[in-house]
Amino acid sequence: MTRYAGIAFEDRMATVEFRVAERPHISVDSRVCEGCSTKACVTACPADLFALTADGGILFNYEQCFECGTCYMVCNEEGAISWSYPDGGMGVVFHHG
Ligand code: SF4
Ligand code: SF4
């Protein structure tokens, strides 16, 4: 299990609310990912939203995205990730305290 500063990943995720928009704000072209040698998104995404498929592609789920942009920055192949912010009022809501 992934841990950050002694807090379980699941506990940390439980403090975040996601207003899921109908339109995915990130899309991943799994065909492009098949040629990717690093698969950097799988380890870089703090919300663990990228999963390798058996045929070398990527399965992606936008619903619990932190909108941090890390996947877009580490992506190894041009055109694999289309990134935008969710529609107004939707997306991640961080709770403090
Ligand atoms: S923007 Fe951040 S949280 Fe969202 S999918 Fe990319 S790396 Fe993961
Ligand atoms: S780093 Fe980019 S090209 Fe490589 S698997 Fe992830 S999304 Fe696909």
Image: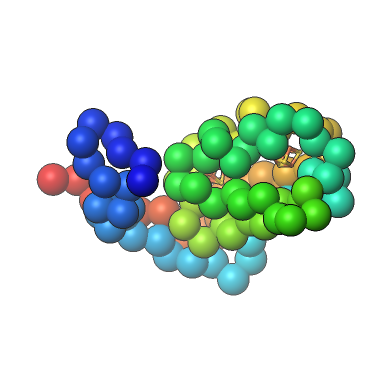
Quadrant of residue 38 within the rendered picture: top right
Residue 45 in the image: state x and y as whole percent.
Answer: 52, 40
Q: Is residue 4 visible?
A: yes
Which residue is at 79% across, 44% downward? 33
Query: Is 45 above or below relative to 87?
Result: above
Front one among 16 and 38 = 38
| Left or right: 92, with 27 as reference point | left
Q: Residue furthest left?
A: 97
Q: Is residue 56 left or right of residue 41?
A: right
Q: Is residue 15 left or right of residue 30?
A: left
What residue is shown at x 41% (from left), y 53% (from top)? 92
Q: Can residue 94 be seen in the rendering of this structure?
A: no
Q: Position of residue 72 (x, y in %)?
A: 65, 35
Quadrant of the image containing the C terminus:
top left
Figure quarter occupied by ligand 2: top right
Tally of numbered discs: 0
Residue drawn at x 33%, y 60% as measured from the top left: 17
Residue 93 position, x and y percent, is: 35, 54
Location of residue 36 with respect to 21 vertically, above or below: above
